[in-house]
Image (cartoon, helix red, strand yellow):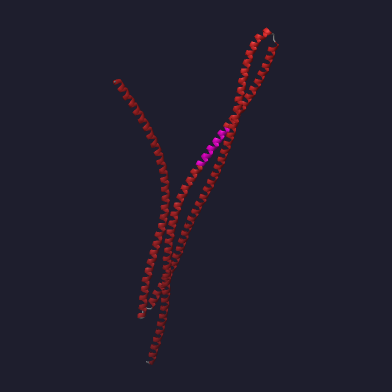
Amino acid sequence: MLQKIKELETAINTAQIETVQKENSTKIVEAEIRAIYRRLQILSDANAKEKMALIEDATKLKQLADISTQNVSHKAEELLKIQRNIQLTANSVKEKEHEAHLLESQLQLQIQQHQATEQKLTESRSECLQLQALLHQLEEKLLIGSQSVQQHIAKELSEESEKLRQVLKEKELSADEDKYLRDKMSEDCGHLTRENGLLQAQVLKATRQLGREKQLREDESTSHSRRAFELASGRDREWQLERELTYLKTQLQNERQRVSKVQEQVLHLQQERKSMDQNGQLLQSQLIDLEKRRGKVQLENSKLQREKTHLVEHIAHLHKEIAEKEKEFSFLHSHVNSLSCDLNSLQSQVDTASILQKEKWKKFSNILTANRASMS
C-alpha cells in the first residue's frame, strides 16, 4: 500500500513538474506573442506615418505640378513675346538695311550725275575758250580790212560778235549753274554720307539688341530646363517612396508569416494541453483575444493598403489631368487661330457686302433721279 502511495506521489510530482514546464512554455509563448503584437503596433504606426508622408508628398507634387504648369504657360507666353520682338527687330533691321542700300544707290547715282556735270562743265569751258579765240581773230580781221569793206564787214562782225558775246554769256551762265549744281551735289553727297553713317549706327544698335534678345531667349530656355529637372526630381522622389512602401509591405508580410508560425505552435501546445486546468483555458481565451486583435490589425493594414492604392491612383489621375490640360490648351490655341481666320474672312465678306450695298444704293439713287427728271 505504501509502495502504491509512493508511486502515486511520484506520479503526482512528475505531473506537477510537467505542468510547471508546460506553464513555463506557455509564458514564453505569451511573451513572444506580446513581442509580436508590439512589432505589429510599431509597423502599424510606421505605416500610418508613411501614409501621412505619402499624402504630404502627393500634395507637394500636385502643387509642384500646378506651379510648373503655370510657369510653363508664363514661359511660353514670354517666349512668344520674345519671338515676336525678335521678328519685329529683324524686320526693322532688314528695313534699315534696305534703306541703307537705297541711300547708297542714290549716293552712287548722285556721284555719277556730279561726274557727268563736271564733264559737261569742262566741255563748256573748252567751247568758251574756242569762242574767245575766234572772237579775237574776227576783231583782228576787222582792224586789218579796208574802210568800205570795214563798214560792211564791221556790221557783220559786230552782229557775229554780238552773237558770240551772247553765246559766251550763255556759256558763262551755264558754267555758273553747273558750278552751283556741283556745289549742291557735293553738299547732298555729304548729307547722304552722314545719313548713311546714322543708318549704319542704327543697324549696329539693332544688331546688338537682337543679340541681347537671343541671349534672353537662351536664359529663358535654361530656366525652363531647370524647371523640367525639378519636376523629374519630384517624380524620382515619388518612385523612391513607392519602393520604401514596397519594402515595408515585405516586412509586414514576413511578420505575418512569423505570426502564422507562432499560431501553429500555439495550436500545437493547445493540443498537448487538453488535460490542463483553467490556466490553460485562460491562456486559450487570451490567444483568441490576440487573434481578434491581429484581425483588427490586418483590417487596418488592408485599409492602409487600399488608401495607398487610392493615393497612387489619385497621383496617376493628376498626371492624366495635366496631360489633358495640355491637350486642351493646344486645342484652344488652334481654335483661337481658326476663329481669328474666320473673323478675318467674315470681316472681308462684310466689307465686300457693304461696298456692294453702297453701289446698289448709288444705282438706285441715280435711277430715282433719272425718273424724276423724266417726269418733270
Tell how many labels.
Answer: 0
Q: Quadrant of the N terminus?
A: bottom left
284 lies left or right of 251? left
Query: Can residue 82 be seen from the camera position used here?
Result: yes
Q: Please report the residue visible at 68 percent of the width from the left and 14 percent of the height from the top.
A: 139
Q: Quadrant of residue 348?
A: top left
72 lies left or right of 170? left
Above/below status of 184 relative to 282? above
Q: Quadrant of residue 317?
A: bottom left
Taking the magenta stretch, the answer to whether it contains residue 91 is yes
Q: Nearer the viewer, residue 359 or 326?
A: 359
- Residue farthest toward the bottom in the current orientation of the protein: 2
Taking the magenta stretch, the answer to whether it contains residue 166 is no
360 lies left or right of 117? left
- Residue farthest toward the right in the current orientation of the protein: 144
Most frequent secondary structure within the magenta stretch: helix
Q: Please report the residue visible at 56 percent of the width from the left and 34 percent of the height from the top.
A: 101
Please state the horizontal and vertical placement of residue 149, each as a whole percent of the image.
67, 8
Q: Please report the residue visible at 50 percent of the width from the left and 41 percent of the height from the top.
A: 88
Task: Give the extent of the magenta segment.
Answer: 88-105
Q: Please report the residue visible at 30 percent of the width from the left and 20 percent of the height from the top.
A: 374
Q: Quadrant of the C terminus?
A: top left
Query: Can residue 116 be seen from the camera position used here?
Result: no
Q: Quadrant of residue 25?
A: bottom left
Above/below status of 51 relative to 220? below
Please state the horizontal and vertical placement of residue 244, each as a whole percent of the image.
46, 63
Please state the horizontal and vertical placement of residue 288, each as a whole percent of the image.
36, 73
Please state the horizontal and vertical placement of residue 186, each as a whole percent of the image.
60, 31
Q: Nearer the viewer, residue 172 or 73?
A: 172
Q: Nearer the viewer, residue 179 or 234?
A: 179
